[in-house]
Image: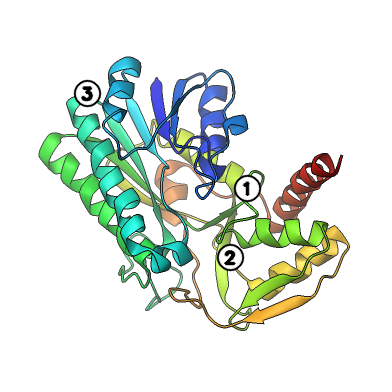
Amino acid sequence: MRILVTGGAGFIGSHVVDAYLAAGHEVAVVDNLSLVGGGRREHVPPQAHLYELDIRGEALGEVFAAFRPQVVNHHAAQASVKISMDDPTLDAQVNVLGLINVLRHCSQSQVQHCIYISSAATYGTPQDLPLDERSPQNPESAYGITKLAGEFYTRVWHDSFGLDYTILRYANVYGPRQDPMGEAGVVAIFTHRMLVGEPVRIDWDGEQRKDYVYVGDIARANVLALEREKNQVYCLGSGQPTSVNELYERLTEIVGVRVPITRAPKRPGDVRLHYFNPAKAREMLGWQAEMGLERGLEETVAYFGQVVQTTRT
């Protein structure tokens, strides 16, 4: 298949590109390589063509015309809850208007299938746990609102223009290539700061608990979504909640350094407890998380250890 991955130079998107190439597909990447977004040219392998542009621009149509994708995998996004609350206009421009531009070109170019990436942030504070595909969605951040809006737009494009879709709602994804300098991605941020001996910041009381899932498992789900039943929504997570304080302790043990903690208040949009029931993904997508948290953290520390060592030399 010819697959266009938006945001394919970013943390998660680049792992998805690798997985598609390994499965024998032809892949192109659209990414604006924004420092805020975390896209890096070096994350894109030479087998994938990189188009450096913004999904909001008209130049996107030229990519569709040149590459003629059969599938679009839409990972490009403004993905920080904090940035979404500080600048909700930017969040909406990227996550809503950018998506509409992608969908518009999908329908004009006879794309067969769009894989839209959504988030656990669409749920807000849950009424019942664990969360699944039928749980009420009441987002409490601008980011959650725009990702939920994207789900509706994706469905509308199916109903109005016949574009098949798969919606993947991610839990908290972690692993190699995550941006340790951003506002999102506690595992990457903690790991990098521990490796260089700097304090870490823990917001709220650190007992907020989320579902952490390894990026390699997420990439595998994106491959499975190509062939499984279309027009479905899947929650992708480990099914196990872990607190920020526990992440700090586990990473301290793996890195072998205990750095100071700076305490900070709760951030707007933060939710106390989130974790998924991934039963539908297991039954219909043939997917479940295989990487345990301990080994996933070890893999992440090893990656950032190499990055820090390379930087120092």
Q: Residue at x 64, y 43 (%)?
A: 177
Of the image marks 3 and 1, the number of the one nearer the N terminus: 3
Where is residue 123 shown, x and y percent of the image?
37, 68
Q: For mark 3, what is the residue?
A: 109
Q: For mark 2, what is the residue?
A: 240
Q: For mark 1, what is the residue?
A: 290
Where is residue 301 shown, x and y percent of the image?
77, 51
Dot 2 lies on which element?
loop
The amino acid type found where label 2 is placed reads Gln
Where is residue 55 shown, x and y percent of the image?
34, 38
Please indicate whether residue 231 sits to the left or right of residue 264 in the image.
Answer: left
Q: Is residue 142 above or below residue 119?
A: below
Q: Residue at x 71, y 78 (%)?
A: 262
The Cα atoms of the two marked residues, 3 and 2, are separated by 41 Å
Q: Residue at x 62, y 48 (%)?
A: 290
Number of on-image labels: 3
Please indicate whether residue 236 sits to the left or right of residue 146 in the image.
Answer: right
Q: Is residue 268 above or below residue 312?
A: below
Q: Quadrant of the N terminus?
A: top left
